[in-house]
Image: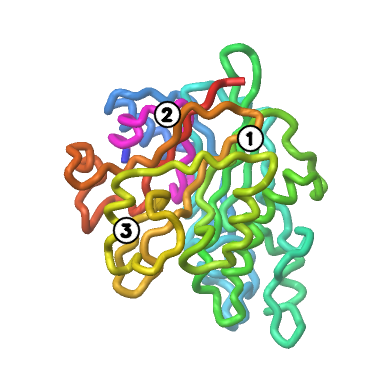
Amino acid sequence: MAAVIAHVAPDAVLLTKIDYDHGLHALHAFADLIRAQGHDLPHAFALRPNGGWRTGIDMTGDGRADTADDAQGYGAFAGAGGMAILSRLELDAAAVRDFSGFLWRDLPGARLPRVDGALYPSDAVFGIQRLSSTGHWDVPLRLPGGGRLSLLGFYASPPVFGGAHGRNRLRNHDEAMFWVHLLDGTLPMPAPDGPFVLLGGSNLDPHDGDGKHAAMRRLLAHPRLQDPEPRSAGARVAAQHPASLGHRGDPALDTTHWTRAIGPGNLRVDYVLPSADLTVRGAGVFWPAPDDPLAALLGPREDPPTRHRLVWVDIVPP
């Protein structure tokens, strides 16, 4: 994965599902691996994720209060499955906005799980339940000319598991809708007022697989955003796998290679969406075709280090 990042050579990259530790030792060690491959990203940033953040109460209604599912976000230990930013550009840490403590119930139109009309498992759960399964951040980068470019990062719950009441499916929908409401100015916190890039893993395809796809389509169509529709030759070839047959979305836009016999197939669930006021020079997904020598960077075809592919967008700095 370090070799892939070094090859693409981004100025800033959002990493997802990377465990958090208090001193960011793992993150700095990964940055060292990237540096050893020839690309230096000296500025590192991460906050404690909601993954593994213990609540001490039964959050799922299964009669237990100390499982990985009873944390604010799924995780067997504090810091599990977090996210982080590595950057060539300096980060303005003092101006970071962390929305990860925002309560799910406070989202306009929140789709909270209910059984027979009552909140499930209890009103008390949603008195403390955060919306973000991992986090929602606004992290400004300092540009060489003195300006700022905000990175709006998130990593959402998968829209599966979570019980028959659809807890994860509903939460996944609302984690995407958080950005719609923030950009619309309908949340207690101000909308970003400068150029920004919304990026991260929504675990939600706009057409295929599990989940409430309308939320992703609404975000992609937001007037303050633009969708460069990053593509790859590798995704187009990989979509010929039986698991992806019958999909409605453009297979060249896929960002994950899921080949289980019973599963969603390949999907577009990773996004880099610049604000509408930015000029886009190019976009793509690092997913070389199988006959491309660069495909070796992805690792063994049937057992890669990650099924997700790196999405990149090249923008003109404001």
Label 3 sits on a secondary structure element that is loop
Label 2 sits on a secondary structure element that is loop
* Disc number for residue 10: 2
Q: Is residue 83 above or below residue 208?
A: above
Q: Which residue is mark 1?
A: 275
Q: Which residue is mark 3?
A: 239
Q: Nearer the viewer, mark 2 or mark 3?
A: 3
Does label 2 or label 3 sit earlier along the sequence? 2
Q: Nearer the viewer, residue 156 or 270?
A: 270
Marks 1,2: beta carbons within 8 A: no
The amino acid pointed to by label 3 is Ala
Q: Residue furthest top?
A: 145
The amino acid pointed to by label 2 is Pro
Real-space Cα separation, disc 1 to disc 3, in angstroms: 29 Å
Real-space Cα separation, disc 1 to disc 2, in angstroms: 18 Å
For the record, the magenta segment spans 2-20
Marks 1,3: beta carbons within 8 A: no
